[in-house]
Image (tube, rainbow, N blue to C red):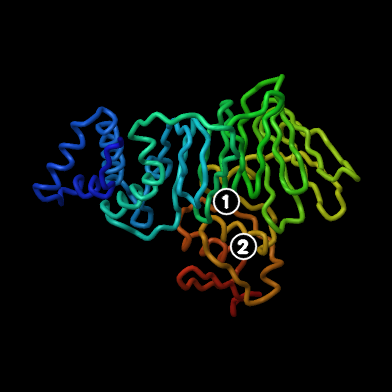
């Protein structure tokens, strides 16, 4: 039988807003197990971190943004888009565009996210193992996070992306399915290759670090290798095409003609900056920039002129503030923008040349 406590009560307790009855409830809960005491310590760390935020625009500092919860989940459901998580997992969640909140509100939001897997993280219950199943992990727009697979492979998942993994890998290979964008730090196992399948391509490795991008609607599948070597191929059996990519190489598979083009990139971090929470663009058309802004900030971007959609942007957008990001784009391209709720509109400036 699991002991349960309203998570929001912990936030209220730390805010010193509990009445005597509520204080007693928390005290009783803490006395029931060491796990409960660990829970309180983690919430206290979050609470203390919130006191030192030096920006009125940012609710979370780095400690709050990357709340890494290492846990063992045998067969529970993460109610994060009703997805399942494999055993031996960690999950990191953050939203870069939350409005400015007080400490209590910030903790309530964190508690809400933690509540998705709170029972399994802080209460122990024996679960009988079941037959292997496929588990799906999804990140909504505005969020990114990660998971450690049963073989030790770490997967960092970008916004608006999902991976499907088996609860137990097969004896001869490790196979996952990706929709969207993710970075893989693959645990080495020469006898058990790691395969990432997308709608149109297959990436095979033995142990390396690389990123794959294949969002729904994309006409190009992209793979960039940080370390090691990967095999990048189409899944078209009638017109099979394959290349070997080494560290620093970028491969692009055109789904329309099944052609793979490769190039060496001197600044590979530019393709992996999303992992650290910022965006980097080099001579990128605004219509492509808009897609990434929509995923990262969970907004809608529209262009009042087709000319703007074809403009090319070179910029490093490190700020977590959407307003600052839009201002940077506006100044770089000499265009105007308006932001109304979750809709951003770009238009030609009256003062543009």
Left or right of 224, for residue 67: left
Task: State which quadrant residue 177 falls in.
Answer: top right
In the image, residue 143 sits, relative to residue 207, either above or below, namely: below
Percent x, y for residue 275?
Answer: 55, 43
Front-lying residue, 301 or 20: 20
The Cα atoms of the two marked residues, 2 and 1, are separated by 12 Å
Residues at circles 2 and 1 in contact by the CB criterion of under 8 Å: no
Q: Residue at x 60, y 69 (%)?
A: 334
Front-lying residue, 113 or 66: 113
Quadrant for the C terminus in the image: bottom right
For marks 2 and 1 on the same chain, the one whose residue lies earlier in the sequence: 1
Percent x, y for residue 112?
Answer: 36, 50
In the image, residue 322 sits, relative to residue 54, either above or below, namely: below
Percent x, y for residue 168?
Answer: 60, 30
What residue sits right under mark 2 in the picture? 290
Front-lying residue, 309 or 219: 219
Please give the count of numbered marks on the rendered protein.
2
Percent x, y for residue 189?
Answer: 67, 21
Left or right of 101, for residue 205: right
What residue sits right under mark 1 in the picture? 279
Secondary structure found at label 2: helix
Q: Residue at x 50, y 50 (%)?
A: 82
Left or right of 270, for residue 83: left
> Alpha-carbon neighbours of circle 2 within 10 Å: few (<14), some, or many (≥20)?
some
In the image, residue 210 sits, relative to residue 97, either above or below, namely: above
- Mark 2 or 1: in front is 2
Quadrant for the N terminus in the image: top left
Task: State which quadrant residue 151 falls in.
Answer: top right
Secondary structure found at label 1: strand
Front-lying residue, 167 or 211: 167
């Amino acid at each position: 039988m699991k002991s349960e406590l309203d998570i929001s009560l912990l936030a209220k307790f730390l805010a010193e807003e509990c009445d005597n009855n509520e204080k007693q409830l928390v005290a009783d809960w803490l006395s029931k197990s060491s796990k409960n005491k660990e829970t309180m310590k983690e919430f206290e760390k979050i609470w203390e971190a919130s006191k030192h935020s030096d920006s009125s625009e940012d609710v979370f500092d780095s400690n709050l943004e990357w709340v890494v919860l290492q846990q063992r989940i045998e067969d529970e459901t993460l109610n994060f888009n009703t997805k399942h998580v494999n055993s031996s997992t960690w999950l990191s969640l953050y939203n870069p565009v939350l409005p400015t909140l007080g400490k209590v509100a910030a903790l309530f939001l964190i508690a809400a996210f933690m509540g998705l897997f709170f029972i399994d993280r802080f209460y122990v219950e024996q679960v009988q193992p079941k037959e292997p199943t496929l588990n799906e992990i999804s990140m909504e727009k505005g969020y990114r996070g990660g998971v450690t697979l049963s073989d030790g492979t770490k997967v960092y998942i970008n916004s608006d992306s999902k991976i499907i993994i088996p609860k137990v890998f097969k004896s001869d290979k490790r196979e996952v399915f990706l929709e969207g964008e993710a970075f893989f730090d693959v645990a080495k196992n020469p006898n058990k290759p790691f395969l990432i399948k997308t709608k149109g391509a297959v990436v095979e490795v033995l142990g390396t670090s690389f990123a794959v991008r294949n969002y729904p609607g994309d006409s190009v599948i992209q793979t960039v290798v940080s370390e090691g070597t990967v095999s990048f191929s189409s899944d078209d059996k009638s017109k099979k095409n394959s290349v070997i990519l080494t560290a620093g190489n970028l491969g692009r598979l055109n789904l329309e003609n099944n052609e793979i083009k490769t190039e060496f990139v001197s600044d590979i971090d530019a393709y992996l900056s999303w992992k650290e929470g910022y965006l980097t663009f080099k001579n990128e058309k605004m219509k492509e920039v808009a897609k990434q802004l929509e995923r990262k900030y969970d907004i809608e971007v529209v262009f009042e002129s087709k000319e703007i959609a074809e403009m090319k942007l070179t910029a490093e957008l490190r700020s977590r503030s959407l307003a600052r990001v839009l201002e940077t784009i506006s100044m770089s391209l000499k265009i105007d923008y308006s932001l109304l709720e979750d809709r951003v509109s770009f238009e030609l400036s009256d003062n543009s040349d």
